[in-house]
Image (cartoon, rainbow, N blue to C red):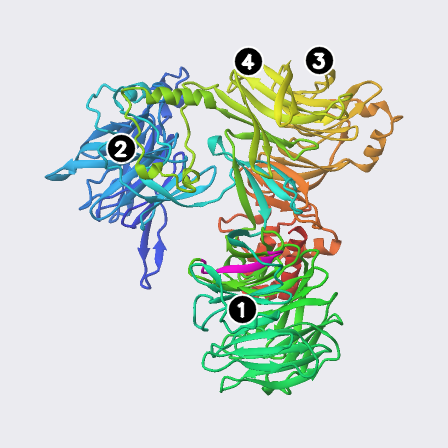
Amino acid sequence: GQYLAADPKGRAIMIAAVEKQKMVYVMNRDASSRLTISSPLEAHKAQTIVYSVCGVDVGFENPIFAAIELDYSEADQDATGEAVLEAEKHLTYYELDLGLNHVTRKWSEPIARTANLLLAVPGGQDGPGGVLVVAENWVAYKHMAHPEVRSPLPRRASLPAERGTLIVAAAAHRQKDMYFFLLQSEYGDVYKVTLETAPDNLDEVRDVKVAVFDTLPVASALCITRTGLLFAASEFGNHHLFQFQGMADDPDTVAARRAEDPELGDDALSAAAVAPLFAVRARPRNLALFDEVESLAPALQMAVADYCQEGTPQVYALCGRGNRSSLRVLRHGIAVHEVVVSEMPGHPSAVWTVKGRKDDEHDKYIVVSFTNATLVLSIGETVEEVADSGFLAAVPTLAVALLDDNSTLQIHEKGIRHLRADARPAEWKTPGKKTLERAAANGAQLAVALAGGEVIYFELDASGALAEVATRELGVEVACLDVGEPPEGRVKSAYLVVGGYDDTVRVLSLDPAQGPLLEQKAALTLPARAESLCLAQMAAADAGGAEAHQTMTLHAGLANGTAQRATLDLISGTLSDPRTRFLGSRPVRLFRTKAEGRRAVLALSSRPWLSHAPPAAGGRPVLAPLSYPQLDYAATFASEQCPEGIVAVAGGTLRILTLARLGDLFNQTAVPLRYTPRRMCPVPNTDRLLIVECDQNEFNAAEREKIEAEVRNRPDVPQVVEMEEEEEDEEGAAAAAPAVRGPAPPTEGKWASCVRVLDPAAGETRELLEMGDNEAAFSCATCVFHGRGGEAFVVVGTARHLRLHPRRHGGCFLHVYRLIEDRLVPLHRTPVEEVPLALAEFQGRLLAGVGKSLRVYDLGKKKLLRKCENKTFPTMITDIKVQGDRIYVSDMMESFHLVKYKRGDNSLAVFADDQVPRALSASCLLDYDTVAGATKFGDVFTLRLPVEVSDDVDNPTGNKLLWDNGVDGAPNKLENLTNFHIGEVITSITKAALVPGGAEAILYCTIQGTIGALLPFTTREDVDFFSHLEMYLRQERESPAGRDHTQYRSYFVPVKETVDGDLCELFAQLPADKQREVAENLDRTPGEVLKKLEDMRNRLL
């Protein structure tokens, strides 16, 4: 069903289709208070279209449902068309008789032909009941045995009288002593609707008051929460959460009242005669932006490149619609916010934080170690140096720890300093001339490594002293060691892990119940020397889906820039399930930290990484990079101003950082654009991006300013008076105001467009060229023409006075510009017959897809010179890719065409095309013989030219029959390699690697803002494994919508040679017994299956 409505008392629901069918289900509870649903009761009406349905509040009487219906039975039989013009919409009540268990048609009355929405009005003791009928330009109250009360919608002063105002979203708020409705128009204006009833009769509605509330971005749905927040779910752009600051009760609020004239029609001119006018505010007055959810919808084009010179590619996506458009720069990793960056006297080598007491929430000191000294800083409202902390300042520090008795340890190369509040500092000196090289401690244990490979183990005894309890010679120099935090329910850690210069990690026992102290329990050989070790027990689930109470994870950072993770069994001390991940070019250092209150591990290499177990990942450990430059050392940080942060040293600076949105795979920054972006392309030999933008039914910036100035000078329009607090220049206030739509043109066919030169690294516009004369830009490219000294010219394809239905225009052009010092200098323009949607450089010339024609242009003095042309394409050329002499042409409805440029004849010949007609929406070149494409129906596919055909085509002496096109199109057909249904309209597709050294994948973006990847398999073993895993999961995981998985993925053509990775990822969410069952069918353990999935993800990210 298209529509769903519920009785306000929860006794029944109605499901209605767009045409004819309406079914009512009675809701009950059985003896166990479980909800039961009855068989459906039919309320069908043939030859009827339904526009809206809602449940009417009638208290505990028989439930009533209201519907807007249109009976087309007479119009369907009338060939003259007069019945269509006379057809009326009706408001119809359907009553469910609970006693007879039957649905009857109780009441019906004609309403406005433009009615499109019903809202239930509270009834009983709270209100008069009935419904609000929302139509274009009008809002009316209607109920049985009650006359209609109608009010116009207030109109923008800049809105032409002939243009209507349509409501697109609505929300109702109900309390014991009040209720109101919020309606939003197609322009973004929000109206507050209240009903005024007779003082002595609550059921008599005397007036419908429609007040201007605020102006917000257009939403697809509005919802008022019980806590008094308004959520606006946008169809395009970010979703917003607002807090109410006022209720539009000010005396200067513009409001419409009941229209008394019964002769007024439902059209815009009638409403404009009585509706009050208002001027749009720049920022909301009654609402304050509380939070927003980022959304890329609609993503129109995507590129992956390192324009910012960061060493890691960024994803650049053109997103949004109208003045809410933006260029989103997505960086792989977690967003990092800088709180403090302070220069230090020298280059720090390490940093720690120390609390005053174990149970303190915030840290007391920051300890910074240098090569020859130690600096102690106190944490308060400000960070200041402390001289009487008890720490030795003249030596470099190796480690700092707070013990369980609230005493503090400072470990340095000459010994250990034990600081206690009730006694003098205790010193432990290293024996002989040995130096202390490595140390690790927790609240009750300390392990140190001396030069030569000697490990000494200390424990905190009952008297508060640090006692040496065990010593062991390892026979190899110690590179790193870690004691780890005690597992839950224990006071001490049972194991010490030691990394040696012999590329091994040893697990030594610290539990007397398991045998002698420092006895080796296990060893793990590493591919390189361990630079750092970290034992962590994160809230992760094991391979069987159960909580990992008996395991701990050993993280090892290696000198070759890789990190290895293994599972440490707390009973036996053995290591298992090792997994390796490359992090960077520098040795990896590991540090325990916290992320959203959960334990995590921070890994520092050439870029920082965070290993954590977010709930969204099902408790599975996730290793994600941080979007931040290289750090040298780090520690956890907590203060009143920053409850959960990281203090780190980088070069000669001390930094305090916080992490944001840990669940996001990418963090993003937005560069605002003026109109809807259509295409972008890089400018060669520069770091600039060229973006063309255009909007239909919009004024350009100059026209908009002129109209708004006229509105401000009109005496019949109430002037907007900004509040004093709004005029204050608060940081971020302007950015917090969502963009609102400007004045609308009176008729269709009006375009606003511009060409932008952008610096993506700085996020700044270097040049903005507005297109005049109702001209819109749809394509762009750069071209280095022959004999022009390597200069890159900018070519823009435009159309003037374009109307889409029916399709016509007032002229199309190819504009050529020179880019001189970030300025676009017009050179000339060339008229063409159709809209040029595709442009590309081709061997020192310009390839242009002009309607059905593919043309080659050269640069002339006064215009572009046509060199050759092919007019045989079926519908319209939408994209062009070039490699060598071969041209890959995308047709709007007929898939790919491969074209060969024949130099001898100076002609373009189509020698291969697709066997299946596909409505292409995006294309990408994979190699010389292979292309990937996407359709407007949500399919992604790959095609390849057969090898024997490719050889014949590239042979200049080949048979001329290769170029002859017959009735069936080109003489050669492309082979279909893969098919897969995504389910969303794919707008852009490209081949790229998201991380340096990562595997190349086919990346795509969709109209709903989704970014996905198709990763090629490298071995037949992987193909077999994931194909069988997908097969078993199809049986174990049923779709919530009841879809058959294979049928869904074969929506347009049967799925072929593609495995659904999203479905395979659901293996981790299966119950433990199901995981074991599926894994046994694959002849593997659940841990091995999860590792296989993780390895596949790591290839991409």
Checking the image for residue 810, the label placed there is 4
Q: Amino acid at mark 4?
A: Gly
Distance Cα–Cα, label 4 vs label 1:
68 Å
Point out the stretch of residues depicted in magenta: 642-652
Location of mark 1 (residue)? 546
- N-terminal label among 2 and 1: 2
Residue matched to label 3: 861
- What residue sits right under mark 2 in the picture? 211
From what the image shows, is residue 380 above or below residue 684?
Answer: below
Q: Earlier in the sequence, mark 2 or mark 4?
A: 2
The span from disc 2 to disc 4 (Cα, nearest Å) is 42 Å
Task: Please tell me whether mark 2 or mark 4 is closer to you in this view.
Answer: 2
Q: Is residue 1025 left or right of residue 625?
A: right
- In the image, 441 versus 264, the foreground residue is 441
Secondary element at tag 4: loop
Task: Name the mark on residue 660.
Answer: none
